[in-house]
Amino acid sequence: TRPERENVLDTVRRVATPEGVEITLRVAGPVPRALAYALALLLRGAVMFALMIAVSALGNFGSAILLLTAFLLAWLYPVSFEVLSAGATPGKRAMGLIVLNDDGTPVRWPSSLTRNLLRAIDFLPFLYFIGFVAMVANRDFKRLGDLAANTLVVYRDEKSAAASIPEAGPIAPSIPLTLAE
């Protein structure tokens, strides 16, 4: 048995790739995910405010543009960024998070659409209550959209500096080797 470590919250997931390589993913909890969503809301709000000022003189046509933009920002903004921008909306990028499939591969259109369309259910009855309950009930902090799409929100690993190989001359083995050896 593991001493004292039983009660420690473990947010590290190990995933074996088909090539037999094990990768480690650090799962993001509710707080960084909520902060990332808040940043995305601020960005979308700023876009809507700027557009509202820009189209205010266009009357009903301006209102139509505003409503269409609001729809696109609500439903396609997260999907587009997750698929086309390495799994991260600007809010997630600012928080150092990305969305991946459960197997560690990049998220694609079907998975991203599924997880983001189910955001409407996660939001019920108010302020992501169902999504929050699902997250704290799941060891990988998955909301309903993540469960349905088999996705995971994890911390983006910082790129490590390339390892340098020290300069060394060749050394002959102490025993002569045959060609087969």
Image (spheres, rainbow, N blue to C red):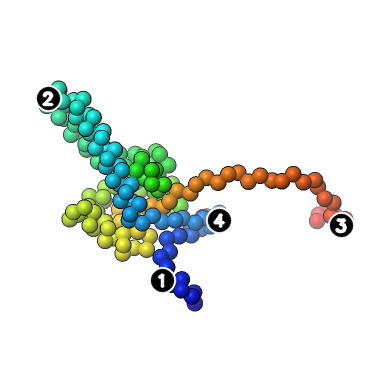
Q: Which residue is drawn at 33% across and 54% down?
A: 31
Q: Disc 3 designates what residue?
A: 174
Q: Which picture quadrant has residue 103?
A: bottom left
* Amino acid type, callout 4: Val
- Estimate how packed mark 2 is, as few (under 14), some (14 to 19) or many (20 or more) residues with alpha carbons within 10 Å: few
Please, what secondary structure does the residue beneath circle 2 have? loop
Q: Residue 59: which disc?
A: 2
Q: Which residue is drawn at 31% across and 43% down?
A: 39
Q: Residue at x 23, y 54 (%)?
A: 128
* Amino acid type, callout 2: Gly
Q: Do the residues labelled 1 and 2 touch (CB within 8 Å)?
A: no
Q: Disc 1 designates what residue?
A: 7
Q: Residue 21: which disc?
A: 4
Total marks shown come to 4
Q: Which residue is drawn at 80% across and 45% down?
A: 169
Q: Which residue lies furthest to the left in this view?
A: 60
Q: Do the residues labelled 4 and 2 touch (CB within 8 Å)?
A: no
| Of the image marks 4 and 2, the number of the one nearer the N terminus | 4
Residue 142, percent from left and from top: 34, 57
Front residue of this view, candidates 55 and 102? 55
* Amino acid type, callout 1: Asn
